[in-house]
Image (cartoon, grey):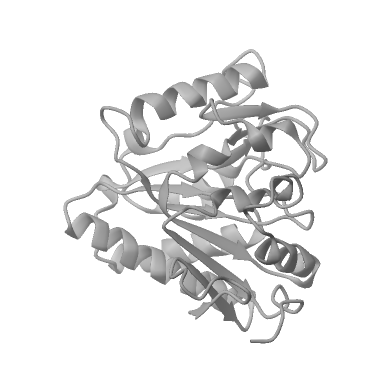
Amino acid sequence: MSHLPGADPGDASAHLRVLPDAETLATTVATDLLVRLAAAQGRGDLPHVVLTGGTIADAVHRELARLGPASAVDWSRVEVWWGDERFVEAASGERNERQAREAVLDHLPLDPARVHPVPAVDAVADVAAAAAAYAEELAARGPGSADGPDAFEVVMLGLGPDAHVASLFPGFAQVRVDDEGAVPVTDSPKPPPERVSMTAPTLARTRGAWFLVSGEGKAQAVADTLAADPTDPGAADVTPAVRLAGVPERRWYVDTEAASRLPAT
């Protein structure tokens, strides 16, 4: 894993790994996550991991299902969260939760009490209520709570062609919300329009932020995000991921297509 191009050479937290294709990326991320979770448990921690959605996340989840049973991870001692969720019916194929359950969660011996999905349309009155309920769950069980860890172990994030992360979209007010654990989104430029997202400070409360990006369509977003200056007051409105610049460890796993517009190193 190489240092990020253009980053401060003294910043040992920022690393880039370019993989030849999406399949190799998925296997690499899954393998690294299994090692990370086992190491956390080995030091006596109960690791909390935040999942993301999308095509590359689905591939990672399927690799976790394949490799996970033979790993050293005690799956009954892993807490699972989602960085964002589409506010649709619980049975909808658009739900990140359903995608993850079908690909990996239903295939591993997780403790159901340690899996924390965002409330669906069926369960609450509206998207604001879903966000409020998830914020309450985070306050009760997440990082910084009486029963939670100091930080998530790993937060996994995708990156949209417009550089959005979770459901924090460039130019949206939710990018700069600092006093809530989760926020509603009612006019997402990517359907469905209603979503719930962890806020940037919540996502940033992690030991590791892992960005998983595949495909030429996201190459410019990758280049722009990695070139952004986190000290620029306006940077987050263009590339919301800069709000995670203070995370102790930031890893970028990208395939060659997604890395195609990065400067040569």
Q: Is residue 241 left or right of residue 191?
A: left
Q: Is residue 158 left or right of residue 207?
A: right
Quarter of the image with the C terminus is bottom right
57 up-or-down from 187: above or below: below
Find the residue positioned furthest to the bottom.
265
Residue at 33% x, 63% y: name it: 36
Q: How many marks?
A: 0
9 up-or-down from 107: above or below: below
45 up-or-down from 195: above or below: below
Query: In front: 94, or 207?
Result: 207
Q: Where's residue 42, x and y in %? A: 18, 59
Q: Where's residue 114, x and y in %? A: 34, 37
Q: Is residue 150 left or right of residue 182?
A: left
Visible residue check, residue 73: no
Q: Where's residue 235, x and y in %? A: 71, 50
Find the residue positioned furthest to the top.
125
Residue at 41% x, 43% y: name it: 80
Q: Where's residue 178, x and y in %? A: 56, 31
Visible residue check, residue 141: yes
Q: Quadrant of residue 88?
A: top right
